[in-house]
Image: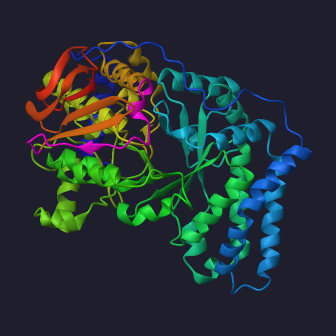
Amino acid sequence: MASKRLQKKKAATASKLETKKTDYIKISTQKAEPAKITTENQKEPRLTAAPEEDFIYQQRFSRYYDELKWLYCELYESSESVLSHLKDLTLKMKHFYDKRKQSLRKSDIERAFNPDWFQAGNLSGMEIYGNSLPETAKSQDELLNYMEECHTNCLFLRGSEKDYSNFAVRSHNRGICICPDFSFDFSEQFSQSSGFHDPVTFNNMISLLLSLANQGADMICINLLPPFPSIGRMMRIICEIVCPGVLLLGKTDMEQKASLSWFGTPEKPVFHLLFSSESMANIWHTVATRDISLLRREIDRRASLSGNCIFQNALRNHDEIHWTLDYPYLKDCAMEELPHRHYLNDFFTGKYPRSFARGEKGQEGICGTTASLCGIEEADFEGNSSKLETAVRYDIMLHSLLLSLPGIPVLLNGDEIGQLNDYSLPLIDFNKPLAENRKLAHTVQGQIFSSLNRLKTIRSSHKVFDASVPARTIDTWDASVLAIIREHDGEKFIGIYNFSECDKTAWINEEDGIYIDFISGRELEAKGVNLPAFGFLWLLRK
């Protein structure tokens, strides 16, 4: 898959990364207790609901049934016996509710009383590929132990079709959420009008969705959504009736402005969360151009959205980076779409002069880990300790931005230790032997791992980092330096991020007192602050 030049680098890169010593920030961290999101383990459920539980179900059903019926009949009005299909759907819903475990019903009730439970700043995720889900109880415990060590309490299972019921129980006992992929093929079923007008297909889709919920899913990631908002709204209604503790996460490559309709409205919401690949693309566009204007524009646009618009954020995941950028805006900045796509692809495959990135061209975008794309792979291969120090700083800076943005941050498993590209595999497996170096403070893995854990500990300790707290940008008077402000309940946070390979001064001028630098602990005014190349600052008003 890779070029011969990149293939030759693999063996040298792997061996060097395990032993190389670099001098960089050493951030100590204390063991943090994982956030307890769900309830303790319960006894196995009855297969039918008790009278009081039937009453709860009927309350929910009565609340939403009229809207469900209206949407269903409107969508499938051309189908014969539409009411018969609707009856079949409601029987399926009651069937799945009756089979739902007592512990999950209890969690449903608790979360219904606290519908914003997932917006706390202590929720952070890790994504693994479904085939990496361990089979044995021992190996599952090892994964959960590692997640706790990473201060991570939500596991995203990409591409998994395994039954994970037992794993979900073990996870919930530790306060760790599970988010599997919904593998239903929307593109096949709904691209043709026959699929669109087939209520049987919809009913079968709901059975698959509720089956995932009953296995213990706390969130369900839904990919390749059809362009029919009524389908998303019906999915939300059905979950509110059967399993209101389960979140729906929409994932799309649509331009962000167009994808916002999938949130619905505060009165008639659709998805609880949305992952838009545009946000990930904007960050890497900024890396390649050293120009923060597009990223700044996105952050400020998000700040104007209603409170029900909560995003999942990621630097990298198992998908390619698709260049779904705001090209009309970039055109006004003298960046034409086709030449700019070519530039981005050349930069992140290392073809552009002086590029530090090492990725690969995919079908439509770029593949690569965060560490390889921000320069760690190149620096280590060259044996350049100065470059490596700077690249490690850049990796940590990009993650600090991710962790400080409104929404839910999710790391690709391996990014927490600076894992590099594996050019022999189409999907990068987690490198367990390399992960052992996280315990050694002088290694690349130890520096990144301890730094990110320190940032996660800070994030979980301050309400200003809650997912729903908006961010706004302020001028730094430098095109490469981004500054964001988040304020909540008396706390004021300023995050400053240098996307340049040169030392910079952020010419901010906040005249509201003394701030504390979260990393060094020093006190300073938020005026004319200095940052090293690819460095960052997290400031909190004292």
User: Where is residue 378 shown, x and y percent of the image?
Assistant: 21, 34
User: Where is residue 214 shown, x and y percent of the image?
Assistant: 74, 46
Left or right of 63, for residue 46? right
Quarter of the image holding residue 496? top left
Q: Name the residue rendered at 30%, 52% in the picture.
A: 281
In the image, the segment drawn in magenta is 460-479
Left or right of 476, for residue 239? right
Q: Name the residue rendered at 67%, 23% in the picture.
A: 138
Q: Depth check: 178 or 306 in front?
A: 306
The relative height of residue 520 versus residue 204 in the rendered view (above or below) is above
Q: Name the residue rendered at 54%, 56% in the picture.
A: 271
Q: Name the residue rendered at 30%, 23% in the picture.
A: 17
Magenta span: helix, strand or loop, mainly?
loop
User: Is any atom of residue 114 visible in this view?
Assistant: yes
User: Is any atom of residue 361 visible in this view?
Assistant: no
Q: Depth check: 542 or 154 in front?
A: 542
Q: Is residue 254 magenta?
A: no
Quarter of the image holding residue 36? top right
